[in-house]
Image: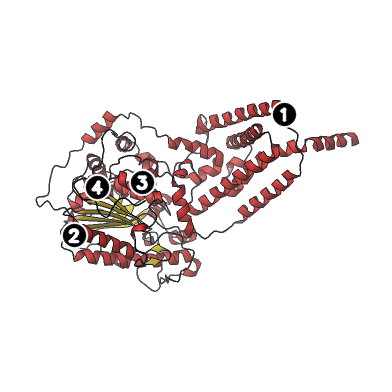
Amino acid sequence: MKNKLNLCKKFLATNFGTIFFYLTPLATFIMVEILEYGGSDSECLRPNTLAFWANIFFFYGVFLLFRSVTGRTRFSIIFVNFVFLVFGIINHYSIAIRNAPVVPWDIYAAGTAAQALNGFKWTIPAEVIACVAGCIIWWIITMFIKYPTIKVRKRAGGMAASAVMLTAFVLIATVGRGNFYISAWRQVTANRRNGMALNFTMNMDSLFNEAPTDYSKENAETILSSVPADETESEEAVQPNIIAVMDETFADLSILGDLNLENTDDVMPFVHSLSGQENTITGQLVVPAFGGGTCNTEYEFLTSNTYAFFKSGSYPMLQYVHDDTESLASVLSEQGYNTVGMHPYYGSGWARNRAYPLMGFDTFLDIESFNDETTEYLRRYVSDNSSFDKVIETYEKNKEESDNPLFMFNVTIQNHCGYDTTYENFPETVEFEYDSLYPYTKQYLSLIQESDRAIERLVNYFSEQEEPTIIVLFGDHMPYIENSFYNHLTRYSSKTAAEIEMDQHTVPFFIWANYDINEEDYADIGRISANYLGPLTLDVAGAQMSEYQEYVYSLKNKYPVISAVGCINKDGVYVPLEMAAQDLHDYKIVQYRSVFDKDKSKSSTSTGSGDILIGSAAS
């Protein structure tokens, strides 16, 4: 017995470095999943699951590959472990901040994410502290261990073993993907069940867009031509100015439940007062975003494409707008409008300074177009008041310098998250029951109150103008506030989980005009999805729609809401997206044509006859 113990001690002493190396990939895998903090959902940590072994193949394959290439065991342990620690921490905060793990297409949004995160108050939870401390201890131990020299034969063997493991991993992630939980719209759950490495790899297919079954360009053209073109023209040939405002995080939380406001009856009294008013259309807009992802709502509005046909977490405006793209701006430009896009923040956000010119905007104004001395800031963002001042300034300049009507699309910034810091330049005035428990919500509701006042001021200005003008205003998504407050609002709701999720993707919209628009024709507009709002605006303005817009608009009668979180049919009944898929198959075909198979030999946009205002697109 004593001899056996001595042999064991000798074996451990001789091979401890090798044993420690082979423990590192397992420890790294566990660390990454702890950082994700999946709890009971972390099925990938159970050795009796295929997901566990797939991730094991990946981590061991990567460590073996790196050691075989470098021939340095100590460096391989520390460096590769450090890389996965950083990636795991990024993934942790990605889930904490936006309720979505890191996915392949996030590379397109890295710059925007870096800008947006400036507003967050960072906390370091226990799992991050534990993993960082554990890694540091692991690295210190690594430095004091002696490792055997990795000879050429062993390096070749390690390379071969790595190739086998990584090949097995890729085959499992591709050929065997049917064995795993795959949900385009519930990536957090998928990540925790499959493991970060496996789920990330399975999402790589989203970078390669497959055409719908029975797709062909001819088929798409046949479907488009099935909708009769609108040949009617206004007898008066009125071309109103169109001021479109996507107000940052402008949402009505009261649709989820009673806000129990204490010192005011309503935080958006003016917007609510527009309901039933003359020359005004009001309704609810179902948007693809929640808590973030502004560009996806503006993409739906501008292009009439539905986000329901893209993968959750993707950013079509970044990923797919690489050449001339039809949009409201390009369609109106062809009809003689001067087209201006504006965002009072960095022009690189969501790549607007690149995408807007390709979508037919003559001019793009970003934060560089604002005068710091005269611009009002609430918290650290340009206020809606100052944003609307720039709208008015642009309108007046267009009136002076051009005979062409103006289409302006203003994406505001005032209400952008986070809401965790108090500011001297912004007193939080809204009070509600238990507001001390929900400081994010208190700040958010106070911001919405300010937005409502600014919107009233904008409408009042244009009500005094003689030029016919339409204002279409909508929010982009609900706010990133305390989850506990959302639970508080819906605690007594009789709605299903799917219906609540739909409500959480619903924001108010209105179309107002300073001339007669026969609003009675749209009295039953109710709830629509954002892909219809652009064609609806053209319809109200009496402008001509493109063939694609006419097709999309024709679907509104059957499915007023088409969304990734579900559809609503003409009878007001909620229909899961997968159940509506067959009815929407033709839409998917023509959208694929519009996005991925458009004619690149000829421009789909035109600068029109309008003068270009202000200057070139801001960089």
Residue shown at the point (58%, 44%) measured from the top left? 42
Picture coordinates of residue 293 (x, y %)? 41, 50
Mark 2, other Cα within 10 Å: few <14 / some 14–19 / many ≥20: few
- Asked whether disc 1 touches disc 2, contact meaning CB atoms under 8 Å apart, the reply is no
> What residue is pinned by disc 4?
535
Foreground residue among 202 and 556: 202
Point out the residue furthest to the bottom here: 263
Separation of residues labelled 1 and 3 (CA atoms): 51 Å
- Asked whether disc 4 touches disc 3, contact meaning CB atoms under 8 Å apart, the reply is no
Label whose residue precedes the other's in the sequence (4 or 1):
1
Mark identifier at residue 354: 3
> What residue is pinned by disc 1?
151
Q: Secondary structure at mark 2?
A: helix
Q: Amino acid at mark 1?
A: Lys
- Asked whether disc 2 touches disc 4, contact meaning CB atoms under 8 Å apart, the reply is no
Label whose residue precedes the other's in the sequence (2 or 3):
3
> What residue is pinned by disc 2?
400
Q: Secondary structure at mark 4?
A: helix
Mark 4, other Cα within 10 Å: few <14 / some 14–19 / many ≥20: many
Separation of residues labelled 4 and 3 (CA atoms): 24 Å
